[in-house]
Image: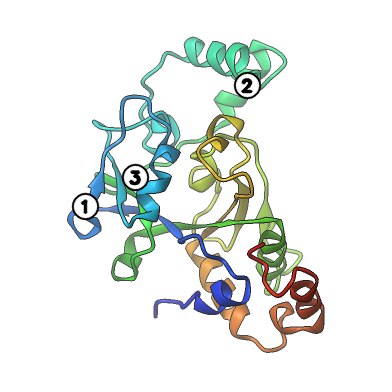
């Protein structure tokens, strides 16, 4: 049964559309489609997503996220090390940057088409992750909801690993079948594509289902006096 996030969106006053990453055999159900430019940041498509369009990626047509979204490496390793270290300033030395690159894993698509765009419930079987674009108050509530059903022996329900913006919406999850969330949109190179208040909260499909259940439980933090006091302090809405 497809989960219903409407309670979360309503209680948290989340107005930005939920964005899904899909690994699908056929792109046609996701039309209208847009294609990336050469080495284009996938977040350049943010306005397209907000207009109901879906970014279509393949191993032949992809943007700068190809190494970690599709397993395609268009740049030699040393060139990538120099770019990330010398131009972006992400590590103190080439050696450290290289060690991180070697440890990073790429998502291996099951189908020929990777699609990023509005949540489509009729394509739920191909959904891999869902991203909420939220402000700090909304993020804090989602983080609280993410731990609601967790046990100490479970994988950490919320993580904030280092990586590019596109990695944080897919490839940085060790197990997409585990209920887990990544606090993302921390990559300086992609943040200019977002509104200043926007943070990313990307969840696996199991975590998405868990959050929807959390939102329906009257005993959860989403329905307490503490939550109501936060809304009151913000003037009646967490949207800001």
Local secondary structure at mark 1: loop
Residue 228, image x, y percentages: 76, 80
The image position of residue 191, as x and y in percent, is 57, 37
Tag 1 residue: 27
Is residue 186 placed above or below 155 in the rendered structure? above
Question: Which of the 4 image quadrants contains residue 13?
Answer: bottom right
> What residue is drawn where x is 37% and y is 52%?
49
Q: Which residue is mark 3?
A: 109
Which element is circle 2 on? helix
- Residue 73 seen anywhere in this rendered image of the structure: yes
Residue at 67% across / 67% down in the picture?
238
> Could you tell me how far apart the alpha carbons at marks 3 and 2 are, in whole angstroms?
24 Å
Q: How many marks?
A: 3
Check whether the beta carbons of the residues at disc 1 and disc 2 lie within 8 A of each other. no
Relative depth, front residue between 20 and 14? 14
Q: Residues within 10 Å of mark 1 (few under 14, many from 20)?
A: some
Q: Label 3 vs label 1: CA separation?
A: 14 Å
Percent from the top left, x then y, of residue 178?
A: 55, 61
Query: How many neighbours does mark 2 have within 10 angstroms: few (below 14), some (14-19), or many (20 or more)?
Result: few
Is 188 left, or right, of 26 in this rendering? right
Q: Position of residue 118 (x, y in %)?
A: 37, 59
Q: Is residue 202 above or below residue 113?
A: below
Q: Secondary structure at mark 3?
A: loop
Quick one: label 1 or label 2, which is nearer the N terminus? 1
Which residue sits at x=73%, y=63%?
153
| Residue that label 2 marks | 99
User: Distance between the Cα atoms at labels 1 and 2?
Assistant: 36 Å
User: Is 119 on the left or on the right of 61, as rendered?
Assistant: right
């Amino acid at each position: 049964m497809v989960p219903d996030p409407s309670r979360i969106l309503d209680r948290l006053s989340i107005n930005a559309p939920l964005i899904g990453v899909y690994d699908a055999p056929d792109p046609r159900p996701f039309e209208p489609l847009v294609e990336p430019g050469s080495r284009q940041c996938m977040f350049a498509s943010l306005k397209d997503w907000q207009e109901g369009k879906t970014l279509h990626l393949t191993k032949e047509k992809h943007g700068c996220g190809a190494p970690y979204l599709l397993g395609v490496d268009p740049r030699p390793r040393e060139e990538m090390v120099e770019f990330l270290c010398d131009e972006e300033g992400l590590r103190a030395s080439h050696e450290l940057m290289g060690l991180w690159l070697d440890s990073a894993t790429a998502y291996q698509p099951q189908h020929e088409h990777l699609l990023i765009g509005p949540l489509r419930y009729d394509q739920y079987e191909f959904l891999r992750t869902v991203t909420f674009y939220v402000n700090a108050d909304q993020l804090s509530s989602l983080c609280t909801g993410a731990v609601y059903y967790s046990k100490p022996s479970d994988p950490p329900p919320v993580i904030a690993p280092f990586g590019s913006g596109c990695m944080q919406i897919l490839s940085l999850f060790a197990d997409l079948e585990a209920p887990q969330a990544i606090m993302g949109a921390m990559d300086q190179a992609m943040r200019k594509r977002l509104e200043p208040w926007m943070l990313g909260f990307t969840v696996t499909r199991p975590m998405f289902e868990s959050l929807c259940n959390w939102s329906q439980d009257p005993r959860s933090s989403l329905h307490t006096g503490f939550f109501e006091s936060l809304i009151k302090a913000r003037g009646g809405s967490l949207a800001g």
